[in-house]
Amino acid sequence: MSYQILYCPIGVPTFHLESAQIQFDKSVSLLKHLSCDVVCPEKMLLSIQDLCAFLEGKNPDLIILQNITFANAAYASEILHRTGAPVMLWTLREPVIDGGRLRLNSLTGAYSAANTMRQMGRRFSYVFGSPDEAATSDKLAAAIRAAMVKKDLQGLRLTSIGHTPQGFGFGRAADLDLLRAFGVTLESIEARELINKAKSYTDEECAPYLEEARTHMGTLADTPQKNVADFARLYKAYKDYVTENHVGAVSSRCWPDFFTDFGTPVCAVLSVLNDLGVYAACEADTYGALSMYIGGRLTGSPCFFGDPVSLDEEANTVTFWHCGMASCALARKDTGATVGVHPNRKIGPAMDFGCEACESATIFRVGRDADGSFRFLVSSGKILDKPKQFIGTSLVVELDASAQDFVCQSVQDGWEPHYVVTYGDCAEEIQMLGRMLGIPVYEY
């Protein structure tokens, strides 16, 4: 997918243009380093006419609005009139304070632009700092990633395979809700459609699919041959469907149908799909699959999907677990992606391993409030080097904030029981994405 990030350095020619030019050159260098999709003007935009000429014919996914010097509200008004793209407002640090001339007055210009955006009902993100400061670079990079994911969502085809089980309605989504809030296209099919397809395949048709799946999973030697063959059939049905229909994420029903009607769980199929970059959640949790997609796109890595099942106040940790559909790529290196059975039904194959450690992680959930509006949950921490905690797949997160407060407050606030744990810190990006989409973010 192509993106367009516009750098708009606005100002007036009555300030110290030598200082402004230095900041302009440094800013262009930084932004070009952060993304090849940044479009920069050839010179500073020191008049409304210059700004309009630069904006002509552009369709940006993000505006980086920088006060290269002070600029009045007419500049921001012109940008907001011409585009509905999200805005990252950037204030430059005053380069010299020596009792002499005010060189840039960028901060006053930021207040002017911010007031205009507020009055026009436009949300925006903000960064204060010079282009050679690491914190400035990090925040701009986060804004660019968030804007790209916002656009990615508009091209996402998410498929719900089967209905949520009774009592799991928190994951059930309506197509118009997803289209309106995220731009996501939701399609729904019955689980039996893919089950029936799987039943129709021969062993010969499924053989290459089984061999491909084996490159991700551990040994299937302890899995009964019938279940191995049925897994291959199910994997072919799912993989062919998502490939032929250009599906980027799936939420799949799992129990009881795949145990009672098919005799083999879908857990390992979803695990391998996650390896392939198709974000797959179980128990038909559509908002869980959407959360995985957002987290995965922000970090570039597969996400863990599961329930918070254990709190250790002394260690300040929360354990996340699920029956056995984590991406094989997340398995601890000392064990690999070992295969077992579903912890309740005792039928395989299902994944059965602890996940590897990571110094930076984010807990994330796209949720619904009591009035049906969307909200984001976010918390930060690190994934510890811990073995498998229970039968299935698991990881242990040490939170930056209080783990006890996280559990108690998120329960008190009525959040859903499924969460995504990302491999990488994307809390800043989630905050920005929430602003871009008009969705409140609750940080714990």
Image: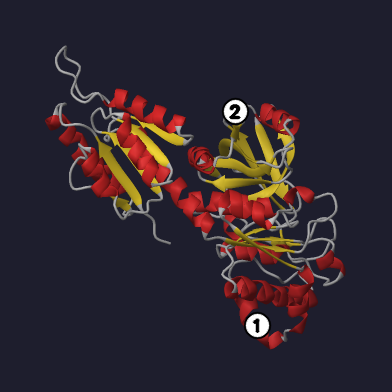
Q: Are marks 2 and 1 in contact (CB under 8 Å)?
A: no
First in sequence: mark 2 vs mark 1: 1
Depth check: give the residue in front, 71 or 309. 71
- x, y percent for residue 281: 68, 57
- x, y percent for residue 112: 35, 26
Regarding residue 332, the answer to whether it shows in the image is: no
- x, y percent for residue 262: 82, 72
At a point 71% along the width and 85% down the height, the residue shown is: 203
The C terminus: image quadrant: top right
Return the residue found at the far left. Answer: 18
Q: Judge left or right: residue 42 versus residue 115.
A: left
Residue picked out by circle 2: 401
The disc labelled 1 sits on which kind of residue? Answer: Ala
Residue picked out by circle 1: 207
Q: Judge left or right: residue 279 versus residue 351.
A: left
Q: Is residue 84 above or below residue 203?
A: above
Depth check: give the residue in front, 376 or 78. 78
The disc labelled 2 sits on which kind of residue? Answer: Ala
Q: Is residue 18 above or below residue 319?
A: above
Give the quadrant of residue 406: top right
At a point 43% along the width and 62% down the height, the residue shown is: 1
- x, y percent for residue 327: 62, 58
The residues tagged by marks 2 and 1 sit, at their Cα atoms, a distance apart of 48 Å
Label 2 residue SS: loop
Disc 1 crowd rating (10 Å Cα; few below 14, some 14-19, many 20+) is some
The number of discs equals 2
At a point 38% along the width and 32% down the height, the residue shown is: 127
Q: Judge left or right: residue 48 versus residue 239.
A: left
